[in-house]
Image (tube, rainbow, N blue to C red):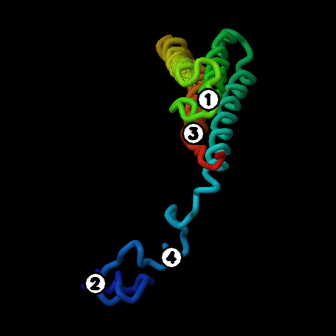
Amino acid sequence: ESRSKTLSAIPGCGECKESGTVFTRCLGFFDTLRCSECIDWGEKRNTVASVAAGVLFFTGWWIVIDAAVNYPDTERLNHSYHACGVIATVAFLMINAVSNGQVRGESYSEGCLGQTGARIWLFIGFMLSFGSLIASMWILFGGYVANGSAVVYPGIAIFFQNAFIFFGGLVFKFGRTEDLWQ
C-alpha cells in the first residue's frame, strides 16, 4: 500500500498514477531526454564516426607522448617500443585506404588487382593492426609486469596507444557509411 502511494507521487502520465505502476516511458524526467530512436543519425553518422575515430587516434598518441616525456631514458621506456605505434598507424591507414565497395567488388574501377587486391590489402592491414596490438601486450607483460619493474606506466601507455589506434581504425572503417557518397 505504501509502495503504490510512493509510485503515484512520481510525476508521470495519468495512466501510471491511476494504476500505481511506473513505466520508464511514462516518467516525466525521461520525457525531456532524447533517445537514439528520435535522433536522425543518417546524415551525421559519418561525422560522428570520423570525430570518434580521430579522438581515439589522438588519445592513443597523446598517452604514449606523455609516457615518452615522463620517461625519456631507455631503461624505463625503450625507444624501440614506439615501433608498435608506428605499425598500428600504418595499419590504420591501410585499413581505411580501401572502401567497403572495393572489398565487395562494387566499385567502378578495377584498380590494382581489383577486388582481390583490395581484400589482400585489407587483410594485411588487419594483420598489422592485430600484430601491433599483440606486440603491445607482450611489451606490457613481458617487459614490465613479469620483470617486476617498479614503473609499469610506459608499458600501459604502449598498450593503450595501440588499443586506441586499433579501435579508432575499426570505428573509422565500419562506423561510416558509403551510401552518402553515391
Query: Mark 1 or mark 4: which comes first in sequence?
Result: 4
Name the amino acid, label 2.
Answer: Ser
Name the residue located 49 percent from the left edge and 73 percent from the top edge. Answer: 30
**Cβ–Cβ under 8 Å for marks 2 and 1:** no
The local secondary structure at tag 3 comes to helix
Are dots 2 and 4 in contact, CB under 8 Å? no
Rendered image quadrant of residue 56 = top right
Residue 33 percent across, percent down from the top left: 54, 70
Q: CA distance from mark 1 to mark 4?
A: 43 Å
Q: Are the residues tagged 3 and 4 within 8 Å (C-beta)?
A: no
Quarter of the view holding residue 11: bottom left
Give the residue number, with chain letter if any, for mark 2: 2
What type is the residue that disc 1 sits on? Val
Q: Residue at x 67, y 45 (%)?
A: 51
Q: Mark 1 or mark 2, which is nearer the start of the sequence?
A: 2
Above or below, 139 against 159 in this view is above
**Viewer-side residue, 64 vs 57:** 57
Question: Marks 2/3: CA distance?
Answer: 49 Å
Q: Amino acid at mark 4?
A: Asp
Which residue is under mark 1? 98
Which x, y percent locates residue 16?
Answer: 35, 84
The first of marks 3 and 4 along the sequence is 4
| Residue hosting label 4 | 31
Where is residue 123 drawn, in percent x and y?
52, 21
Mark 2 or mark 3: whose residue is earlier in sequence:
2
Report helix, strand or loop for mark 1: loop
Task: Please give the label number shown on residue 171.
Answer: 3
What residue lies at 53% left-to-right and 15% top-to-bottom? 135
Which comes before the other along the chain, label 1 or label 3? 1
Label 3 to label 4: alpha-carbon separation: 31 Å
